[in-house]
Amino acid sequence: MDFNKELEGFNFFEVDADLENYTNETVCYLDAFNRTLKKIGKEQNSANLLLDELNEKLEENSGRTAIESDLRNRLEDANRENRLHLENMIAMMDQVEDLYRYSLKHNSAEWASQIKLVWENMKNALALSGISIIDSSGTGFDPQIHTAVLVRVNADIPAEAVLEVLKSGYTAKMQVLRKAKVIINKKEECENE
């Protein structure tokens, strides 16, 4: 085969129709691919803007979360401190109450009247602060506000009546701080039953 003759018969500057069709199809595919890449680029840019916005909001929220956490910690500290103050105040009230009950039992009328006055003033001061005293002699036993520490028997008094309050209880804002320690009655059971 004569290679030169073959080359002379071939015109390199003429494009074969099939090759031209392939080239046109490839260009169409490349155009479609480029349009798709541009769409993806725009969507990625939009997504990046949204991510930046979300990051800013997360940073703002993390700042708020830190502030909220700090405020919660301060509130817990204040609640612990208030509880400690209440416990100390109740301890002082217990001492005055003990003196008052002692003076009543030992017929010290002058002392009893003076301590009763102090006791009543302290109860009023507590009431102004929203703290109530549970002192319920003669009422029925309520396990939500009373702790029975002794039981006595008296057939003339209803069962589970509070006979005596040994230590007053305290409530604040409908929450029991300490239950009252009481002596309750138990009706004497008949021997026939």
Image: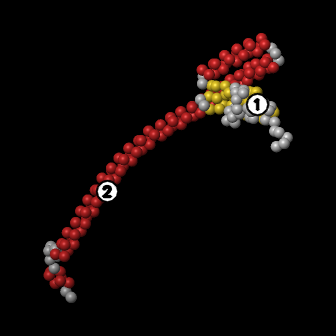
Residue closest to the far right: 191
The image's mark for residue 55 is: none
Helix, strand or loop at mark 1: loop
As drawn, 119 above or below 71: above
Q: Quadrant of residue 184?
A: top right
Residue closest to the far bottom: 1
Type of colouring: secondary structure
User: Residue at 70% of width from left, 32% of height from top?
Assistant: 140
Going from N to C along the chain, the mark reached first, 1 or 2, is: 2
User: Residue at 38% of width from left, 44% of height from top?
Assistant: 53
Amino acid type, residue under disc 1 in the picture? Ile
Neighbor class of circle 2 (other Cα within 10 Å; few <14, some 14-19, many 20+) is: few
Q: Quadrant of the N terminus?
A: bottom left
Task: Judge by depth and name the residue closer to the eye, 136 or 73.
Answer: 136
Task: Judge by depth and name the residue closer to the eye, 174 or 153.
Answer: 153
Residue 74 pos. (x, y %): 57, 31
Helix, strand or loop at mark 2: helix
Q: Quadrant of residue 119?
A: top right
As drawn, 24 above or below 56: below
Comparing labels 1 and 2, the label whose residue is closer to the camera: 1
User: Residue at 29% of width from left, 56% of height from top?
Assistant: 39
Q: Quadrant of the C terminus?
A: top right
> Does residue 187 appear anywhere in the picture?
yes
Task: Judge by depth and name the residue closer to the eye, 56 or 188.
Answer: 188
Check disc 1 and report the residue beneath it. Answer: 157
Residue 92 pos. (x, y %): 71, 22
Residue 187 pos. (x, y %): 79, 35
> Does residue 150 appear anywhere in the picture?
no
Amino acid type, residue under disc 2 in the picture? Ile
Check disc 2 and report the residue beneath it. Answer: 40
